[in-house]
């Protein structure tokens, strides 16, 4: 609704209508907007201006997600920090900046706070992500007023829970936190904070329940791919065609299979090494307690678990990173410690750890929030102190790497490698830049003095504990958690079992191969059939209702295998029901290679994940064998034709382009040489006698440039030519311009200095002309007064 006080559209929490919008509602609103526009200025109906082609592809709003990189990291977090800078003094601002610059992070998190919080618009998305998820809570509690710090703690907890939730209960609790945060935001600040960027947060819990955590739907990963896509583009024309072409070539010709790296320790170190001296006696005692032989142990300083690398304290000492703080599972629950050493005993890996202990203080004691939030806050942000106790744990006990933020006399330690990283089985890429305009929020700023005063008014409440946590209305109800998500997480909890993954993929390939062998004509018909958008959406809905057939340890693997298998199965059924298979094609008379000499090919998407040809040679069905051989032969012919086209057309184009680039580069170098040569000489050819004079060789000093200009005038112009010049048009004369360039090059003047100095030199030019006129006039007068002298 439009707010007259702040002159902007606001979305007050008290006016929320919790009736969910539907796809039909979007379509009707778009149609009504077109009718009201009637060919003139576009009219908005419920925020919609007209029909979009995307309405035929996506189901609104269930298939449209809010990107948390832009909504949270580049949207709401900078807005909050700007408001804090108006509240706290310069000393607190400086303390926050210093603490952010001194934070030591794991080696894979390349985040530097080069700009102050007063210049938060210059922050990248990764800076805000690190702040809201990990380091912001202890820093805000230490330096902000209790009310604002407590309010931000609630927001940070909600985003952290939605980032990669493991249970439906976490999503429900985050939903309550978001509603409580939005309800109290205008009381803590003022109503102008209730922009759409705040209102959109209310939809994040439902989005997370349907599409999984925010870590799986944000734009960080997509923007990371931009640098790979740019490598497929050459020049400035037909960019999309180039990207599509080279992507197809890469999919067709790529035959190397990616292998997940195995877990192993690296950087071996001897027990008698000097850095181990402070820990050697304790380590040997613990090894003896574990009944392990010293001679069979190999010590290491790093351990790589697929895509995640953990360091030891001994390894990180020379560096500024801290990758040795971990959380691990024990009989007491979740504990924290510093990794001193990794070691291998027989075929098992172990960790020598110095433990942290829980402090008597709790983070919940420093904030004023409802008591229902205390337990979760202390769980997400525990306060710890380093102990002198050491222990040995198996390598499988590691949960996450951690970040330690100084907080008074203790450490506030929190998980750095979030659950999302383990679910995906890949490292987080933090080198992200975005094209988001951070000034967009500033366009809604008020301009009158009255409004500015209203924005700086005192908070309506002084303590968040006074606002009850329950009874937030019908909008804050339990969110239905996606059953498929539960299956995925239950499969993920079983651990990364590569053998199970490989066996499952092999079983899938065999099933797909048997399905291909059962009806080759139908498979060929399916691949050549053009499907419309409506049938695609129907298959998508049927795939969502189909439960996964296999449980695999990594989420990405589960998604790929299950999606592809259900996609092919649904396509087979739909094609078979719509029309019967065509009659079998006659085998070709061309020579066909034997099946034993053909390996499984890396094929484009329509054939990806399936074996084209079986390995069994004892097949009694001759028609089936001939169809399979013909299919493989056609594929080879298509690959050969593509290669020939590339050699015949693309390669000459690239060679010609390279030659043109070399020619242009050579011409550019020649132009620079010519320019340097011209700067050294400024030749003038006298039209009367044909002699050439180098104007730059004429003597002159920078302090007396007027004398140098006078000398050039005598060389370039005769008296008659100088008198014939029009004073108003003299600047268009070629000789005049030649003298200008000579002065500029002689004394190497910049444009600004030359323009300033030439004003006086121009007067010198005119004075020279006046002096000649005066001389001629005096001579003429003398002749008239004394004609005998002339005779």
Image (spheres, rainbow, N blue to C red):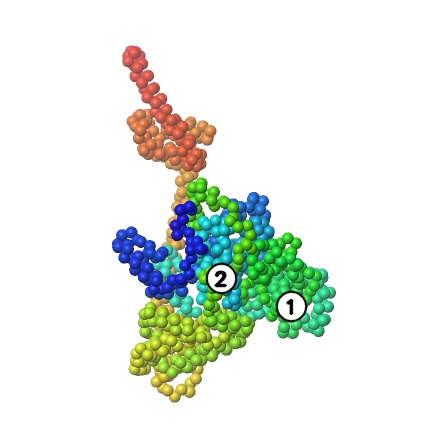
Give above or below for 272 relative to 777. Answer: below
Which numbered tag is attached to residue 5?
none
Up the image or down, 735 lies above or below 337; here it is above
Residue at far left of view: 39
Q: Residues within 10 Å of mark 2 (few under 14, many from 20)?
A: many
Residue 267 point in image, percent of width and height: 62, 65
In the foreground, 374 or 751: 374
Is 305 on the left or on the right of 299, as rendered? left
The residue sitting at 32% across, 59% down in the picture is 30
x, y percentage for residue 483? 47, 71
Residue indicated by mark 2: 175
456 w.r.t. 313: above or below: above
In primary-sequence order, the first of circles 1 and 2 is: 2
**Residue occupying image coordinates x 34% and y 29%:** 717
SS at badge 1: loop
Which quadrant of the figure has residue 707?
A: top left
Q: Which residue is mark 1?
A: 332
Please identify the quarter of the rendering in which residue 28 is found.
Answer: bottom left
Q: In the image shown, does 203 or 700 lie closer to the viewer?
A: 203
Q: Provide the secondary structure element on which disc 2 rests.
A: helix
In space, the residues marked 1 and 2 are separated at their CA atoms by: 30 Å
Mark 1, residues whose alpha carbon is within 10 Å: few (<14), some, or many (≥20)? few
- At a point 65% along the width and 59% down the height, the residue shown is 359
- Where in the figure is residue 101, as x and y percent of width and height? 57, 51
> Can residue 534 be seen in the rendering of this structure?
yes
Q: Is residue 420 above or below residue 71?
A: below
């Amino acid at each position: 609704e439009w707010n007259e006080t702040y002159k902007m559209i606001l979305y007050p929490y008290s006016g929320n209508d919790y009736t969910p919008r539907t796809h039909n509602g979007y379509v009707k609103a778009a149609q009504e907007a077109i009718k009201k526009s009637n060919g003139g200025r576009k009219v908005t109906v419920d925020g919609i201006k007209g029909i979009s082609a995307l309405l035929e592809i996506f189901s609104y709003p269930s298939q449209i997600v809010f990107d948390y990189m832009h909504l949270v990291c580049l949207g709401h977090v900078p807005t909050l920090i700007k408001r804090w800078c108006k509240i706290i003094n310069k000393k607190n601002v400086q303390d926050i900046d210093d603490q952010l610059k001194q934070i030591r992070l794991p080696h894979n998190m390349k985040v530097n706070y080069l700009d102050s919080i007063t210049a938060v618009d210059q922050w990248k998305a990764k800076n805000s992500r690190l702040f809201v998820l990990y380091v912001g809570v202890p820093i805000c509690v230490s330096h902000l007023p209790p009310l604002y710090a407590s309010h931000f703690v609630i927001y940070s907890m909600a985003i952290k829970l939605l980032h990669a939730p493991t249970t439906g209960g976490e999503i429900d609790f985050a939903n309550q936190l978001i509603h409580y945060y939005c309800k109290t935001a205008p009381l803590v600040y003022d109503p102008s904070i209730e922009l759409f960027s705040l209102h959109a947060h209310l939809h994040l819990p439902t989005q997370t329940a349907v599409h999984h955590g925010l870590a799986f739907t944000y734009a960080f990963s997509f923007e990371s791919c931009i640098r790979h896509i740019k490598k497929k583009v050459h020049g400035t024309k037909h960019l999309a065609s180039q990207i599509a072409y080279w992507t197809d070539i890469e999919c067709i010709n790529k035959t190397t299979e990616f292998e997940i790296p195995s877990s192993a320790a690296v950087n071996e170190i001897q027990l008698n090494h000097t850095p181990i001296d402070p820990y050697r006696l304790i380590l040997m005692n613990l090894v003896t307690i574990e009944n392990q032989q010293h001679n069979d142990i190999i010590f290491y300083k790093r351990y790589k678990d697929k895509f995640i690398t953990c360091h030891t304290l001994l390894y990180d000492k020379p560096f500024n990173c801290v990758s040795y703080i971990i959380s691990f599972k024990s009989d007491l629950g979740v504990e924290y410690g510093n990794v001193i050493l990794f070691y291998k005993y027989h075929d098992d890996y172990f960790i020598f750890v110095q433990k942290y202990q829980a402090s008597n203080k709790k983070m919940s004691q420093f904030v004023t929030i409802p008591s229902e939030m205390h337990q979760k806050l202390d769980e997400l942000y525990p306060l710890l102190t380093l102990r002198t106790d050491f222990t040995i744990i198996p390598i499988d006990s590691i949960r996450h790497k951690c970040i330690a933020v100084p907080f008074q006399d203790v450490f506030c330690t929190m998980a750095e490698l979030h659950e999302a990283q383990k679910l995906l089985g890949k490292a987080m890429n933090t080198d992200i830049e975005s094209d988001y305009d951070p000034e967009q929020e500033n366009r809604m700023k008020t301009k009158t003095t009255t409004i500015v005063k209203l924005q700086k008014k005192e908070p309506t409440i002084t303590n968040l504990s006074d606002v009850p946590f329950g009874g937030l209305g019908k909008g804050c109800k339990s969110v239905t958690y996606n059953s498929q998500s539960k299956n995925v997480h239950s499969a993920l909890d079983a651990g990364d079992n590569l053998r199970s993954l490989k066996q499952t993929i092999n079983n899938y390939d065999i099933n797909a191969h048997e399905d291909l062998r059962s009806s080759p004509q139908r498979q060929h018909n399916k691949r050549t059939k053009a499907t419309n958008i409506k049938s695609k959406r129907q298959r998508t809905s049927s795939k969502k209702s189909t439960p996964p057939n296999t449980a695999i340890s990594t989420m990405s693997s589960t998604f790929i295998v299950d999606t592809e298998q259900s996609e092919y199965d649904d396509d087979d059924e739909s094609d078979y029901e719509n029309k019967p298979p065509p009659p079998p094609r006659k085998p070709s008379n061309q020579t066909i290679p034997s099946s034993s000499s053909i390996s499984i090919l890396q094929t484009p998407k329509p054939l990806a994940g399936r074996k084209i040809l079986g390995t069994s040679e004892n097949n009694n069905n001759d028609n089936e064998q001939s169809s399979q051989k013909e299919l493989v032969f056609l594929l080879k012919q298509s690959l050969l034709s593509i290669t020939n086209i590339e050699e015949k057309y693309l390669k000459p184009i690239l060679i010609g382009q390279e030659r043109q680039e070399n020619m242009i580069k050579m011409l550019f170098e020649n132009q620079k040489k010519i320019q340097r040569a011209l700067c050294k000489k400024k030749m003038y050819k006298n039209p009367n006698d044909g002699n050439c004079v180098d104007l730059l060789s004429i003597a002159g000093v920078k302090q007396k440039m007027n004398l140098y200009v006078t000398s050039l005038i005598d060389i370039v112009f005769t008296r008659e030519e100088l008198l014939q010049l029009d004073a108003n048009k003299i600047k268009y004369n070629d000789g005049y311009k030649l003298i200008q360039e000579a002065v500029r090059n002689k004394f190497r003047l910049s444009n600004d200095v030359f323009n300033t100095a030439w004003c006086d030199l121009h007067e010198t030019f005119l004075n020279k002309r006046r002096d000649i006129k005066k001389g001629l006039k005096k001579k003429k007068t003398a002749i008239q007064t004394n004609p005998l002298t002339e005779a």
